C-alpha cells in the first residue's frame, strides 16, 4: 500500500475514533406524571421531549473520558447527571461532549443545569421549568405554569405560554414570545431582550432592566396592572394597544424620550427630560427610565 493511501487510512480511522469511543445511553426509569426531573450536563447537548407515559427514557451518548452517567432518585424525583473528571475546566481535561436525550412525562417539572451544553426543550406543560446555562444556547417551546431561564453568554429562543416567566442574561440575546397572564421579569447586562406577549392575554405585571442591552416589549396590560422598565445606556421600546388604560411616566438624564400623544418636558438649564401621559381611564401604571439611552412608548 502506498504511503499516501496509508496516510489517508490513518486519518480516516482517527476521525472515527471519538464516535467509536462514545458510550451509548439507553435507560428507563419510572416517574410520577407530575414528578420532577433534574438534569445536569456540563458540555454537549440536553434535549428534552415529552410523552404521556409515567416514566423517563434516557438516551444519547456518553462522551469519551467522562466518568459515568449517574441516575438517582425515585418515582417522585429523578436526577440525571453526567459526571466529568474532577479536573474538568482545566487544560488537562480531554473528555468529549455528552449528548443527553430525555423523554419525560408531559407535566413533569424540569430543573436543567448546563455550562457549555445547548438545551432544547419541546412540549413541556410542567408546573415549573428551570434552566441555567453559561455559554450554551437555550430553546424552549411549551406551556410551563412557571418558567425561569438564565444564561450568561448563551442566546435564548423561547416560545412559551406561562402564568409567570423570568429570564436573565449577561451578554446573550433573548427572544421571548407567548402568552403571559401573570408576571414577567427580565434582566440583562449587555444582551438584548425582545418580548412579544399575545395581546389577547394582558400581562398583570412586567418589569425589566438592563445596563447597555436593548429592551423591546410588545404587550397588553391588564386593568390595574403595572409595567416598569429601566436601562442605563440601552434602548427601551414599549408597544401597547390603543385601548390601554394606564398613566405612563417617563424620565431620562440625557436620552431621548418619546410617547404617543405626550408632551415631553425639558428643564431650561441642565440635562433631563420627563413626561406624564394618561391613556384611557388611567387604571394601570407604567414607568420607563433611562440614563443615556432612548426610551419610546408607542400606543396604537
Image (spheres, rainbow, N blue to C red):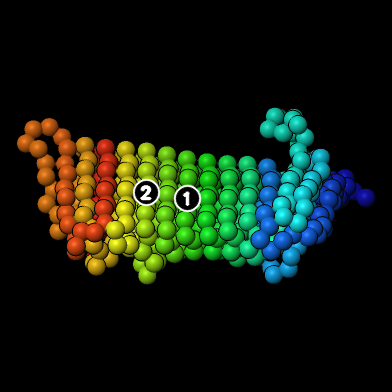
Q: What number of labels is visible?
A: 2
* Side (left or right) of 153 relative to 62: left
Could you tell me if the residues under marks 2 and 1 are in contact, i.e. CB atoms within 8 Å? no
Q: Tell me the element at label 1.
A: strand
* Side (left or right) of 41 relative to 21: left
Residue drawn at the location 42% of the way across and 39% of the way down: 189
Which of the image's four quarters has the C terminus?
bottom left
Residue drawn at the location 75% of the way across and 62% of the way down: 55
Along the line of sight, the residue nearer the viewer: 226 or 112: 226
Q: Tell me the element at label 2.
A: strand
Q: CA distance from mark 2 to mark 1?
A: 10 Å
Disc assigned to residue 166? 1
Along the line of sight, the residue nearer the viewer: 21 or 129: 129
x, y percentage for residue 5? 86, 50
* Side (left or right) of 236 relative to 71: left
Q: Earlier in the sequence, mark 2 or mark 1?
A: 1
Q: Is residue 235 visible?
A: yes
* Side (left or right) of 260 relative to 224: left
Crowd class of label 1 (few under 14; some 14 to 19; many from 20; radius 10 Å) = some
Q: Is residue 4 visible?
A: no
x, y percentage for residue 2? 90, 48
Outermost residue on the left side: it is: 268
Residue annotated with mark 2: 207
x, y percentage for residue 56? 75, 60
Crowd class of label 2 (few under 14; some 14 to 19; many from 20; radius 10 Å) = some
x, y percentage for residue 58? 76, 57
Instruction: Specify the quadrant of the image occupied by residue 180.
Output: bottom left
Outermost residue on the right side: it is: 1
Instruction: Specify the quadrant of the image occupied by residue 195.
Output: bottom left
Residue drawn at the location 27% of the way across and 41% of the way down: 290
Along the line of sight, the residue nearer the viewer: 222 or 220: 222
Amino acid at each position: 500500500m502506498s504511503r499516501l493511501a496509508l496516510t489517508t487510512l490513518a486519518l480516516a480511522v482517527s476521525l472515527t475514533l471519538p464516535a467509536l469511543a462514545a458510550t451509548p445511553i439507553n435507560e428507563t426509569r419510572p416517574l410520577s406524571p407530575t414528578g420532577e426531573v433534574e438534569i445536569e450536563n456540563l458540555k454537549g447537548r440536553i434535549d428534552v421531549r415529552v410523552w404521556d407515559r409515567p416514566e423517563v427514557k434516557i438516551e444519547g451518548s456518553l462522551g469519551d473520558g467522562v466518568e459515568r452517567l449517574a441516575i438517582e432518585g425515585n418515582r417522585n424525583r429523578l436526577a440525571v447527571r453526567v459526571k466529568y473528571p474532577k479536573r474538568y475546566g482545566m487544560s488537562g481535561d480531554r473528555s468529549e461532549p455528552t449528548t443527553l436525550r430525555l423523554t419525560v412525562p408531559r407535566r413533569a417539572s424540569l430543573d436543567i443545569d448546563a455550562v457549555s451544553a445547548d438545551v432544547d426543550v419541546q412540549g413541556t406543560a410542567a408546573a415549573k421549568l428551570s434552566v441555567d446555562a453559561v455559554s450554551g444556547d437555550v430553546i424552549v417551546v411549551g406551556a410551563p405554569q412557571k418558567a425561569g431561564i438564565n444564561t450568561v453568554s448563551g442566546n435564548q429562543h423561547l416560545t412559551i405560554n406561562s402564568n409567570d416567566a423570568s429570564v436573565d442574561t449577561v451578554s446573550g440575546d433573548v427572544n421571548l414570545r407567548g402568552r403571559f397572564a401573570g408576571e414577567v421579569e427580565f434582566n440583562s447586562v449587555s444582551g438584548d431582550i425582545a418580548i412579544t406577549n399575545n395581546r389577547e392575554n394582558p400581562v398583570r405585571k412586567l418589569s425589566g432592566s438592563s445596563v447597555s442591552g436593548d429592551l423591546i416589549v410588545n404587550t397588553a396590560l391588564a386593568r390595574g396592572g403595572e409595567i416598569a422598565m429601566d436601562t442605563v445606556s440601552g434602548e427601551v421600546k414599549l408597544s401597547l394597544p390603543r385601548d390601554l388604560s394606564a398613566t405612563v411616566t417617563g424620565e431620562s438624564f440625557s436620552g431621548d424620550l418619546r410617547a404617543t400623544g405626550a408632551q415631553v418636558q425639558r428643564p431650561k438649564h441642565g440635562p433631563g427630560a420627563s413626561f406624564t401621559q394618561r391613556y384611557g381611564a388611567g387604571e394601570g401604571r407604567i414607568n420607563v427610565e433611562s440614563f443615556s439611552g432612548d426610551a419610546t412608548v408607542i400606543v396604537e
